[in-house]
Amino acid sequence: MPAFRSGAAARAVEKGYVVTPVSSGDCLEPIAAGGEVEPYLVCGLAMKLAQAPGVFRPTLTTRLLLEQVLAGGVAGKTALDLGCGSGPIAIALAMAGAARVVASDVMPHACDLTRRNVLVNGLADRVEVVTGSLFAPFGGRRFDVIVDDVSGVAEVVARKSSWFPDGVPLGGADGADLAVQMLAEAGAHLDPGGALYFPVLSLSNVRRILDAAERHFPQRVEKLASKLVPFSPELNEHLALLSELKDGGVIDFEQVRGRSLWRLDIYKASAAA
Ligand SMILES: C[S@@+](CC[C@H](N)C(=O)[O-])C[C@H]1O[C@@H](n2cnc3c(N)ncnc32)[C@H](O)[C@@H]1O
């Protein structure tokens, strides 16, 4: 067992976790990002994950998106986790047998935290962490599987929801800007026969995102899963404002027996064979 002097890695070892060092003699202390390492179970995969102020925490979207990606199979494939936050998707893909995973985020702080979480889970030999916006760091690099989870909620909703810590970039006024740009660029980074998985939240401009998907992946876009999600207390508090956005065609939600519900859909866009 490596001798971690103090900090989260030492506490993780005390709690009985296996913590893999970067290399002999290294310890995790210089990677300052993050608090306690906590167990996180997703899609039957048990990982350890530290969270940190200012970095997005995994949500229902993380789980529903991963369920669909894993159902499509990742063993032996190369994968890109775009908008990795604290890294749960990249770690799950590697645990599920992906040959090589790249996790990337525009926030250096999120990348530091993902790097640390990758190390804590003993996956540094298969998961690389890269800082940058969307596909900018990747040149002509291609992947079998791309999992996009960049921010996609109308800005005013994102600010009211408390899901997005201050400083996390958002998807523009209608929440669709990043998804539309991602869809325009993703095809050039997919191997023939590869697949792009992405969530679409009705708290963004769904029409704009799906039009872009159909434009760039004609007749190769399918909806894999759909879920109605009750408004959180924060969203309920701002119902009047959200109703205005709905009337303006920016977002959409349903009301069922007095409860407001937004829709989370998971899509797959396939590369040409
Ligand atoms: C909804 S969170 C998802 C985080 C993570 N996948 C999870 O499930 O916990 C969106 C992430 O996208 C990142 N992001 C926002 N704009 C980005 C961009 N232009 N390029 C790459 N990442 C971006 C944010 O920093 C944030 O970490």
Image (cartoon, rainbow, N blue to C red):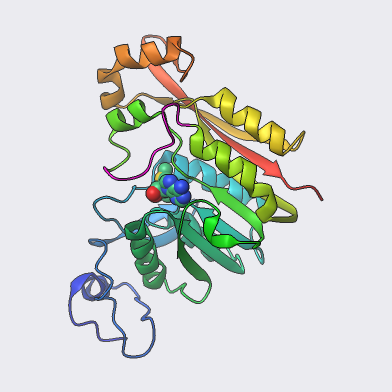
Residue 49 seen in render: no
- The quadrant where residue 197 appears: top right
Q: Residue at x 38, y 78 (%)?
A: 20
Percent of width and height locating residue 182: 57, 44
**Relative image position of residue 107 (x, y in whole percent):** 37, 54
Q: Residue at x 46, y 57 (%)?
A: 132
Left or right for 202, reference 40: right
Q: Looking at the picture, does residue 74 appear above or below residue 184?
A: below
Instruction: Say above or below: 3 vs 144.
Output: below
Would you say 243 lies left or right of 210 here? Answer: left
- Tell me which secondary structure the magenta stretch mostly adopts: loop
Looking at the rendering, the stretch of residues picked out in magenta corresponds to 166-175
- In the image, residue 147 lies at what x, y percent? 56, 50
- Is 166 drawn above or below residue 202 in the view shown? below
Nearest the eye: 200 or 135 = 135
Residue 53 versus residue 62: which sits nearer the camera? 53
Q: Quadrant of residue 31?
A: bottom left
Q: Residue at x 50, y 35 (%)?
A: 177
Q: How many marks?
A: 0
The residue at the point 30 percent across, 86 percent down is 2
Q: Is residue 256 visible?
A: yes
Residue that protrudes farthest toward the left in the picture: 6
On-image quarter of the N terminus: bottom left
